[in-house]
Amino acid sequence: MYNAKAYSAASATSPLASTTIPRRDTTEHDVQIEILFCGICHSDLHTVRNEWSSIMPTTYPCVPGHEIVGRVTSVGSAVTGFKPGDLAGVGCLVDSDHTCPSCQANVEQFCHNATFTYNSPDKHLGGVTYGGYSESVVVDERFVLRVPANLDLAGVAPLLCAGITTYSPMRRWGNIKGKKVGVVGLGGLGHMGVKFARAFEAHVVVFTTSPGKKEDALRLGAHKVIISSNAEEMQKHAGTFNFILDTIAAEHDINAYINMLGRDGNITLLGAPEKPLAVSAFALLFGRRSLSGSLIGGLKETQEMLDFCGKNNITSDVEVIPIQKVNEAYERLVKSDVKYRFSIDMATLKTE
Ligand code: NAP
Ligand code: ZN
């Protein structure tokens, strides 16, 4: 075991602050990674503030961060896929049981024994796992991703959660080429959803509450932007969508978006608001529309997504910040004021 510098929250109401945490020594299947960048996902904020207390209560101290990119510093004796100096990525998962039907189907995120990157029981050290707001991490080789060498690393980090979370449901839904696809909320997930939908040659429409994001949405690849408070514009598009991704992080009227779907259309919920959403049965019955959810993606699909991004030069649009600005970044995240993901330059932790 060794000590690593990190940022942690001591309670649901404390700011994140500098600390040291234990990390395990590299065992035979492990890869030790020096973290270069870590994205700030809205799930980090939900967890730090214990907003999901009824489903996944937070254990403190909490070190968030599951959009990790870095460089391998050492590997265990049985590791075959990585060597010191290689680029590496880690997302929301660091372990699973490898034997259950979900693991065998390459959807480890649904394994009942999955270990999440933070706030999950830590099998090695006891307590809970600590995430990527840290100088290093030690992860089983099977949960470490290969990072394409041609991409900007600060913009790669968010692919490990925001990227796979939007890529996976779009792939699962089928071929969206030529389909009318909506992305609700232009934040971290939403802006990646726009990039992927455009890369898959869909007709992409962004729904936003922020008129100031319109130009950016078009630049990111949207064909059209609808300001959701504009009732007339919403009405004009009602019943015309094939598929919608809802990435809103807070309470909202989901029926307004279900009503955008045409017959047999699907809306997939990605956002995880604290409180349950009220769904109108009639909005689903008429038109045989469906509502589903999706959770990140398995390791195989995450690698496929990273390779796709490498080939198509896709990264997240990031605001790179020093770790010392993390609390300010959280305040801006709550106000939907980020273009379009914060990526922490972890070198700034060295001065703590
Ligand atoms: P984010 O960057 O904060 O983006 C969320 C966007 O939702 C905002 O930028 C805003 O877009 C819109 N929004 C926020 N509050 C709203 C409100 N009250 N009414 C309407 N729109 C609102 O967050 P994120 O990191 O993309 O995460 C989004 C959600 O997905 C979070 O709940 C997060 O926990 C969840 N998540 C789920 C998964 C999964 O596997 N399913 C993975 C990662 C994250 P506009 O300004 O354009 O309106
Ligand atoms: Zn996330």
Image: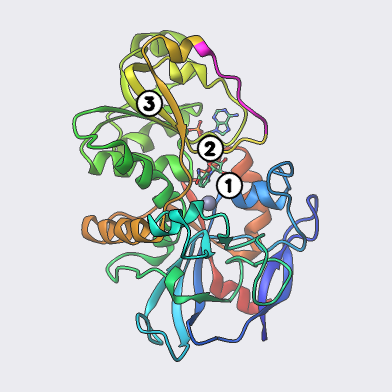
Which of the 4 quarters of the picture holds residue 180? top left
Name which residue type carries label 1: His
Asked whether mark 2 and ligand 1 are closer than 8 Å, the reply comes as yes
Which amino acid type is shown beneath numbered disc 3?
Asn
Whether the residue carrying mark 1 lies under 8 Å from ligand 1 is answered with yes
> In the rendering, at what x and y percent does residue 133 appear?
61, 66
Distance from disc 1 to disc 3, alpha carbons, whole Å, reads: 24 Å
User: Which residue is more in the foreground, 120 or 310?
Assistant: 120
Spatial separation of the CA atoms under disc 2 and disc 3: 15 Å
Q: Position of residue 290 (x, y in %)?
A: 41, 23
Question: What residue is rendered at 48% in x and 58% in y?
Answer: 100
Badge 3 density bin: few <14, some 14–19, many ≥20, Cα 10 Å:
many
- Helix, strand or loop for the magenta stretch, by majority: loop
Circles 2 and 1 in contact, beta carbons < 8 Å: no
Side (left or right) of 65 relative to 316: right
For label 1, count other residues whose C-alpha is less than 10 Å away and answer few (under 14), some (14-19) or many (20+): many
Q: Which mark is residue 271?
A: 2
**Is residue 279 found inside the magenta-colored segment of the image?**
yes
Q: Position of residue 22 (x, y in %)?
A: 69, 79
Left or right of 258 on screen, residue 248: right
Q: Which residue is mark 1?
A: 42
Label at residue 266: 3
Q: Nearer the viewer, mark 1 or mark 3?
A: 3
Q: Which residues are magenta?
A: 275-281
What's the residue type where badge 2 is placed? Gly
Q: Classify the position of the C terminus by image quarter.
A: bottom right
Residues at marks 2 and 1, CA–CA distance in whole angstroms: 9 Å
Residue in the image at 42% along x and 8% along y: 232
